[in-house]
Image (tube, grey):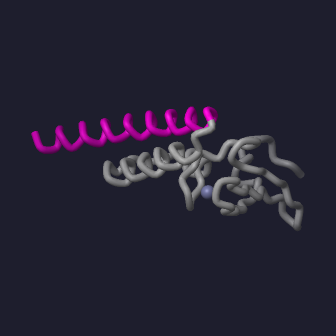
Amino acid sequence: MKKDSRKLQRQVAREAFFELIEISRKEVRSGNWERASQLGELAFKVARKGKVRVPIETKRAFCRRCHIPLIPGITARIRLRRKGRLTIVLSCLNCGYVRRYPVTEVESKGSPSE
Ligand SMILES: [Zn+2]
């Protein structure tokens, strides 16, 4: 019984997490950045509490500092930097947080080059 309810709790948390993310993205598009970042923060809190496995793409799609959904052209600026390895530089336009990660990590599904 206990195990079942825990499982259910996790499922509910998972659903709540993805729903909050959806609403948060909608809020960004409506121009409510502050609300979006609050919802984003709440979503990740729910995920942590409910031990929800958050996909890495979803994690990356949110600012680590202010939790706003990072939408290129709206809340984020993406730049590519070629310094040896091709790197994505993602800046949050809400709080100014900058993140960098190599492209190979993201685009590893494509055909191998050379
Ligand atoms: Zn931010």
Residue 57 visible from this viewpoint: no
Relative vertical location of residue 46 with respect to residue 24 in this rendering, above or below = below
Q: Name the foreground residue: 76 vs 2.
A: 76
Q: Position of residue 110 (x, y in %)?
A: 77, 41
Q: Is residue 1 left or right of residue 101?
A: left
Q: Position of residue 34 (x, y in %)?
A: 54, 48
Q: Name the foreground residue: 58 vs 84.
A: 58
Q: Position of residue 56 (x, y in %)?
A: 56, 50
Q: Name the foreground residue: 100 vs 73.
A: 73
Quarter of the picture containing the N terminus is: top left
Residue 4 visible from this viewpoint: yes
Q: Residue furthest bottom?
A: 84
Q: Is residue 85 left or right of residue 27?
A: right
Q: Position of residue 104 (x, y in %)?
A: 75, 54
Q: Name the foreground residue: 16 vs 28.
A: 28
In the figure, residue 8 lies in which quadrant?
A: top left
In the figure, residue 29 lies in which quadrant?
A: top right
Q: Is residue 109 left or right of residue 64?
A: right
Q: Which residue sits at x=77%, y=56%? A: 88
Q: Which residue sits at x=45%, y=36%? A: 18
From the image, give the main secondary structure of the stretch colored magenta.
Answer: helix
In the figure, residue 32 lies in which quadrant?
A: top right
Q: Which residue sits at x=31%, y=37%? A: 11
The quadrant where ligand 1 appears is bottom right
Q: Which residue sits at x=50%, y=34%? A: 23
Q: Is residue 46 left or right of residue 86?
A: left
Total numbered circles: 0
Region rendered in magenta: 1-30
The question of residue 10 being in magenta is answered with yes
